[in-house]
Image (tube, helix red, strand yellow):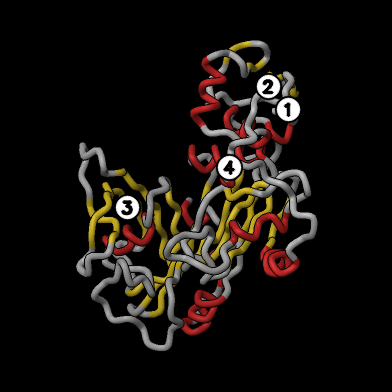
Amino acid sequence: MSGQVVNETVNEKEAGVRLDRWVKRRNPMTQGQLEKLLRSGQIRVDGSRAKSGTRLEAGMIVRLPPYDYSAQKSASNEPWIAPKMPDTRALKFLRPLIIHEDDEMFVLNKPVGIAVQGGTKQGGRHIDGMLSALSDGEYRPKLVHRLDKDTSGLLVIAKHPAAAARLGELFRSRSLDKVYWAVTVGVPHPRAGQLRSWMTKGEGSEGRERMVMGRHGDRASKHAVTDYVTVSTAGQRAAWIALRPQTGRTHQLRFHMHELGTSILGDTKYASEREVPQGVAKGLHLHARALIIPRGQGKPIVVQARLSGTMKQTFETLGFLENEAGRDPLELFA
């Protein structure tokens, strides 16, 4: 801060943002330094003391005290600055993936093979690393949720902090509906139903970390619920399944289909002992097909992602037609 007290009004695009994130975006500091300023009452909201997790509303006035942050070197705490020149390579990659855009968000149809975020095992390009190319020059777009690298389909990107807060809460509270499509090895029995189980982290036969069956009462176990419907079959070799997760656990859909005895085609971590159909494309056959996103007013936004790559090739091989699922993504589960 620049040696004087600043009183700044929260704008509409930052409504719903946590106070600590709002402050750090303007002034780089550690969480400990920020907490000290809050405890001493030097940072206030509408004249009152506040906590770091306080959710700001449009029109609130935040008091920011004089503060010397010149010695703070952590790049991770520096406020984001829009690039002077757009990343044309990133923009060229991302723009064709956008299938919905409004004042709050971009929705991408992510292809198989690109990671959503970077990491020690990812390397190379990832979606999060390219989002500056979609900036309006004021705010850097932000991921609202995640998809595995080998899963295709819908990925929501918030345009500004208020949108990130609202959309993030919808995902956390399960206030929106998600529908996935998968191709399984074999046909589930029964062909439709609801899967309920307790899941926890464990190891597979090859020592790789994966989800395993947990138990009620175990603190590490998470309850998972998935509705599923068989849309079409290729004899007894494979099936096209629509999945509607009621909870959002790691690898939930893959784990549940494996427990049913009909693993998702191409899933090496949760593979079944059934014989894999011949002539199908390689790779995980899981696609985030539809999102039904509530709005403050009016009807919810319904976004659906067409198949591409691995899933599209296998649909053609097995004779599945996308229009068999109907126009309403939730109709199958009625």
Res. 72 visible in picture = yes
Label 4 or label 1, whichever comes before in sequence order: 1
Q: Earlier in the sequence, mark 4 or mark 3?
A: 4
- Label 3 and label 1: CA atoms lie apart by 57 Å
**Dot label at residue 195:** 3
> Furthest-bottom residue in view?
279
Q: Nearer the viewer, residue 225 or 38?
A: 38
- State the CA–CA distance, disc 4 to disc 3: 49 Å
**SS at circle 1:** loop
Secondary element at image label 3:
strand
With 111 as the anchor, is 102 left or right in this view? right
Q: Residues within 10 Å of mark 3 (few under 14, many from 20)?
A: some
In the rendered view of the protein, which quadrant contains the N terminus?
top right
Q: Nearer the viewer, residue 252 or 119?
A: 119
Q: Amino acid at mark 1?
A: Ser
Is residue 324 among the parts visible in the rendering? no
* Image location of residue 225, percent across then percent down: 36, 48
| Disc marking residue 66 | 2
Mark 1 Cα shell of 10 Å, populated few (<14), some (14-19), many (≥20): few
Circle 1 residue: 2
